[in-house]
Amino acid sequence: MKLSPDQKLDPREVLRGLEQYRPRRKGWTWRRKRPHQQVGPFVLEDTSEPLARSVPLPSAHSLGDIDPQCDVVVTTEIASGRFEDDLRRMRMAAWHGADHLMVIRTTGQSHIDGLLEGTPEGVGGIPITRKQLRATRKALDAIEDEVGRPINFHSYVSGLAGPEMAVLFVEEGVNGCHQDPQYNLLYRNINLHRSFVDAAEAKHVIADGGLLQIDGAHNANATAKQAWKVTPELLVQHAINTAFSRAAGIPADRIALSTVPPTAPPAPKLRLDLPYAVALRRLFAGYRFRAQQNTRYMESDTREATVSHVLDTLVSRLTSADIQSTITPDEGRNIPWHYNNVAGVETARQTFMGLDGLSEMVALRDDGPLHDEARAIEERAVLFLEEILALGGYEAAVEAGMFVDSGYFPERCGDGIRREPAGGVGAGSHVRREPDYGAPVCSHFGVNAYAEADAKPCAAYGGCTLCDPAKVRYIDELDAEDNVERRLERLLAERAEGLLRPEVEKHGDGVVCVTLFVPERHEVGKAAALELARRMGLREPEVIHARVMHPAEGSVFEVKGVLDEAVRAGELVIPQRESRLPHAEIEAWVRPRNLHVVAATVGEDEHSVGLQEILDLKHGGIERYGFRTHYLGTSVDLEQLLDAAATHAASVVLISTIVTHHEIHREMMRKLAALAEERGARGDILLVAGGTQVTDALARECGMDAGFGRGTTGQDVASFVVRRLREREEA
Ligand code: Z97
């Protein structure tokens, strides 16, 4: 399967021949670092190999469209609840720099003692199934070819079917996973013994499959009310899972500790978060660090979340994270929307690029408060471990509710999660292995009756699914209604008809978001915002974010709703921008003709940067082609402008308006056209307007010859002028 950048991903292509598909690579891949790399005008220190295809950061438009990639793996977590829609989301995220795509299942699958087949949604969202993993890995193969960088696919090995899931992941080429028995126990109330027995088996399979494992300590962080107080316990949780994973065979550099800077401003974030990050790196040198952005204090303000995430990323850079996991800034209020996956990824990427070379200029102090606090967290963690031992061990500690307590250890609040070691889901379901137990796959923790000195254990029964992929049983959809083929019917029909609807999560969901400021006190404003959204035609409007600007003056609201409208692509009128003429062609025509251009900003507009860029030689403006430009300054009177045009016998008048109130830009364009007409000069001069609110159609409507909006370059303006003047000459 091959993707073409100008074509949509075709889900039928992904599903075709899936039963024969085999993953082409197994195990985890890091980025290839390229220190001291020349990228456009800069030498960058903390970068990796560039992408073949991508969407650069917005500011890159003024920097030669460079798109350097940072040196850490960037993650986004995808959970639309429909895998076929996630594929498009993954493609977009990959183009924006993500190379670790985590799919979180949305069913309560942890409690199901087996694997599901097909691609059911049921009523609870997506489970992990072979077909879904296979389709995703296949699509990711094509996406990684398109962007030119390996993409790590990741999901979660947890719950009662953990070992089966680990085998499935290795069979299907999943590259990374979460696995931590403490997660099962504390957050899913799965029996303690069952969780650890399953984890030993699962971890062994993960080790053999070369997957990167991420632990679950960050969940304490997300659950504790005062997350900065849970830091000593986080070190303990990391230690338990790490030691257990090593014992089960995972090498240190494929164990990633999941760390989240615990606070958000106005808490003194770096003062609290840095010591924890430093303590962690000191204690766990040799392991990998997966830094996750903070969700604990996030409400509905995407701007606020973004600022916290930038600071989280600063902590990552200062303490050398290997993976930067991003949280979508809308996670506090929606099931994340696809464009917010991209926003999260861009936040990390933009921050890393901005911090390039930081470690060569700034070093963390190993004395003073940073050192003292890190030391205090380490000491508290050691005390925590000693108390576990004093209580009689891990079981007793869990029973006593030592975990996720709100106190800063050794202080205790008594609100920790308590688990009965003999209780929980799956209690009593673990049985002692028979001495002659034979494992169904070669990766196995403990004694395997099939193991022989010089042959693979599975040789005894003709090969296992891990050694011989042909043995994998692929079971397609089991449910005649709840399956991907049925779900695709609408999508394919709408695509065939060229129907377009807005969407944020699933194909054509119609969801839109509008921002309104209502000049009233909050409660009234909120009711007004909802009513206004209804009148805009939005079904099921819901305020997803509100912020008081002033108690009496008003609030701003973001309202989401469903727009039950579709447009047909084929019926849209798409303005055709004339193509640019080659530089050489423009110059060859302009230079011998001695053409004069007068230019100014008009109205009361002092913003001349845009216009200067169109004119200026330095900025690649039209002077480079040999135009004689006369820049008259800002807020210039229209009469003066036309006087100057007459003095220089100018062929072109360029006006610009950037910040305009009361439709001044329209008024200025109309007046200029009328004045030129009055003077009898209209036929001799080309009148051209530019500015953020100007469009070509609007400018023409106001009597100009052309209008240019955002993103215009000197080449665009020069191409237009040359074409027009050439026509006149030839006429
Ligand atoms: C993250 N945003 O990516 P279930 N195992 C571990 C986990 O942390 C989780 C699961 C399994 C977070 C993910 C919370 N964590 C969200 C160690 C989930 C998922 O299928 O929901 O039972 O397990 O780190």
Image: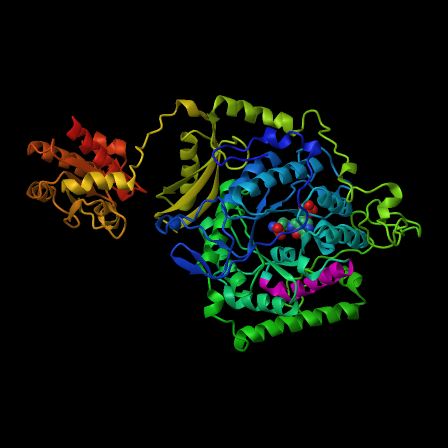
Q: Residue furthest bottom?
A: 367
For the point 39% across and 46% down, the residue is: 555
* Quarter occupied by residue 12: top right
Count every numbered label the image shows and give the total. Answer: 0
Residue 49 place in picture, x, y as percent: 52, 53
Figure quadrant of residue 678? top left
Which residue occupies the foreground of this view, 589 or 499? 589
Location of residue 482 in the rendering, given as x and y in whole percent from the top left corner = 67, 28
Of the pair 700 and 399, the residue shown nearer to us: 700
Is 513 on the left-hand or right-hand side of 645? right
Q: Is residue 240 magenta-colored?
A: yes
| Majority SS type along the magenta span | helix
Question: Where is 129 relative to 416, above or below?
Answer: above
Whether residue 662 appears in this view of the structure is: no
Q: Position of residue 154 (x, y in %)?
A: 64, 47
Residue 621 visible, this angle = yes
Residue occupying the point 60% across, 37% down: 139
Residue shown at 37%/48% (left/top)? 61
Q: The C terminus appears in which quarter of the rendering?
A: top left
Magenta stretch: give its range: 228-248
> Which part of the image, by quadrant, shows the N terminus?
top right
Residue 83 x/y as whole percent: 61, 36
Residue 645 part of the magenta segment: no
